[in-house]
Image (spheres, helix red, strand yellow):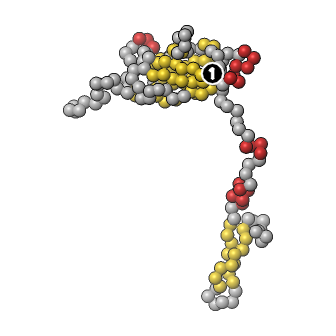
């Protein structure tokens, strides 16, 4: 490394030329980036980032039919000075249409649509009912989206076919 040039290369001797007069010099490019990275990032960059304001966890069961529980938590730092965050939880289909608004599983059973709730762990229930009173959800992909004070968190959910119902005709058309 004492022979390291400004170009980031250093000479290396290889086999002599066929006539044996001189040693041919070849260079190998060193990856200085690798040497610098071996030292590690500055201490400041090694500190942990703050926890996210909220966490939307995977619904259970998943896949499900007709109902599912959707757990989420709001970090206590969001409730500093008595603040209670504004929270919504909505279910969207693949066309990004709101199809349901789950209910908070607590003694109040509030619909999670722009309500103030305390920080901590919570569980919402989507019982499979759709907005507008339509039939239960059709099998497929849905998304739950938690909004806490304007920040959004989204997860995928899978609705399976009801028991005893086939999704395709085994006999064909």
Q: Residue at x 39, y 20 (%)?
A: 66
Q: Position of residue 49 (x, y in %)?
A: 70, 36
Q: Estimate the x, y position of residue 127 in percent, counting from the top left.
A: 44, 17
Residue drawn at (42%, 20%) of the image: 67
Q: Position of residue 166 (x, y in %)?
A: 28, 28
Would you call the spot at circle 1 few (<14 residues within 10 Å), some (14-19), or many (20 or more)? Answer: few
User: Closest to the observer: 58 or 29?
Assistant: 58
Quadrant where the image shows the C terminus: top left
Q: How many marks?
A: 1
**Residue position for label 1:** 120
Residue 98 seen by the camera = no
Q: Is residue 80 left or right of residue 146?
A: right
Look at 44% across and 27% down and name the residue there. 61
Residue at position x 31%, y 24% in the image: 163
Examine the rendered structure and indicate whether residue 51 appears above or below residue 43.
above
Q: Helix, strand or loop at disc 1?
A: strand
Point out residue 27 in the picture as x, y percentages from the top left corner. Answer: 68, 72
């Amino acid at each position: 490394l004492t022979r390291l040039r400004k170009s980031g290369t250093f000479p290396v001797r290889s086999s002599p030329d066929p006539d044996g007069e001189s040693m041919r010099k070849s260079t190998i490019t060193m990856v200085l980036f690798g040497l610098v990275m071996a030292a590690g990032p500055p201490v400041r960059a090694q500190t942990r980032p703050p926890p996210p304001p909220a966490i939307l966890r995977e619904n259970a069961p998943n896949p499900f039919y007709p109902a599912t529980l959707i757990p989420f938590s709001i970090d206590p730092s969001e409730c500093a000075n008595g603040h209670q965050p504004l929270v919504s939880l909505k279910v969207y289909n693949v066309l990004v249409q709101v199809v349901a608004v789950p209910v908070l599983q607590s003694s109040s059973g509030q619909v999670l649509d722009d309500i103030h709730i305390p920080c901590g762990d919570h569980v919402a229930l989507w019982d499979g009912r759709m907005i507008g009173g339509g039939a239960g959800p059709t099998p497929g992909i849905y998304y739950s989206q938690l909004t806490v004070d304007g920040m959004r968190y989204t997860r995928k959910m899978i609705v399976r076919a009801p028991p005893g119902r086939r999704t395709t005709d085994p006999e064909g058309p």
